[in-house]
Image (cartoon, rainbow, N blue to C red):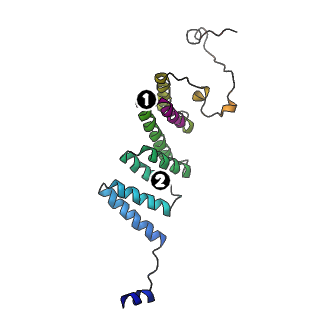
Amino acid sequence: TMAATQAANPQPAPSVLAQFETLKAAVNEALAANNLPAAILGFEQLLVIDPRNPVIPSNLAKLHVRSGALERALSCFAEAHAAAPADAGIKQNLLGCHGMIGNSLVNSGRFAEGIAHYRQMLAYDPDNAGARVNLSNALELSGMRAGLSDFMPGFAPAQLARHILIACMPKSGPPFLPEERW
């Protein structure tokens, strides 16, 4: 009988590499058919097989962005960035996702949450001009005050002093600085 033949000649389990290649082909087919749920599922399965590959969570994150699941995308971009912190493309995508979420929150009036995303962007990239502008605008719209850490994101709170020295060109300070009485 067929069952007896199969029991006598068991098929070897497919290798991990073969499973990976089969899943990869299925993901590519799903992408070609614009079947986002199937592609997302495939990338999630690939991630189980190869959890240290930063390309997989990065591509998964891009699909989550396309499907509108920004928080899930952010988690995947953060995972990819942790696996490959020197990869400028992954870092840029992570920053962009924080920016999209921050903008969405600020536009819906959830200022504190949006501001937290802009601050996180600056923690990753202190020179990010877009995050600086968005943070300043959100603080102004919300009526919240900026903290010294907003201007010195690379410093831990314990490193920030209680006083700050502002140096200006002669006769340029008074119009911009409030008078401080001692």
Q: Is 60 left or right of 84, judged from the image as shown?
A: left
Q: Secondary structure at mark 2?
A: helix
**x, y (%) of residue 169?**
60, 13
Classified by dominant secondary structure, the portion drawn in magenta counts as helix
Instruction: Locate the C terminus and report the quarter of the image it occupies.
Output: top right
- Amino acid of disc 1: Gly
Q: Which residue is mark 2?
A: 57
Give yes or no for residue 114 being in the magenta stretch.
Answer: yes
Q: Residue at x 48, y 47 (%)?
A: 77
Q: Residue at x 67, y 8 (%)?
A: 181
In the displayed structure, would residue 133 be above or below residue 80? above
- Amino acid of disc 2: Pro
Pick out the residue farthest to the bottom: 1
Give yes or no for residue 64 being in the magenta stretch.
Answer: no
In the displayed structure, would residue 144 be above or below residue 114? above
Q: Which residues are magenta?
A: 108-121
Q: Is 146 left or right of 106, judged from the image as shown?
A: right
**In this view, the mark in front (2 or 1):** 1
In this view of the protein, which residue sits in the foreground, 141 or 94? 141
Pick out the residue farthest to the left: 33
User: Badge 2: how crowded within 10 Å, few (<14), some, or many (20+)?
Assistant: many
Q: Which residue is mark 1?
A: 109
**x, y (%) of residue 124?**
55, 39
In this view of the protein, which residue sits in the foreground, 32 or 137? 137
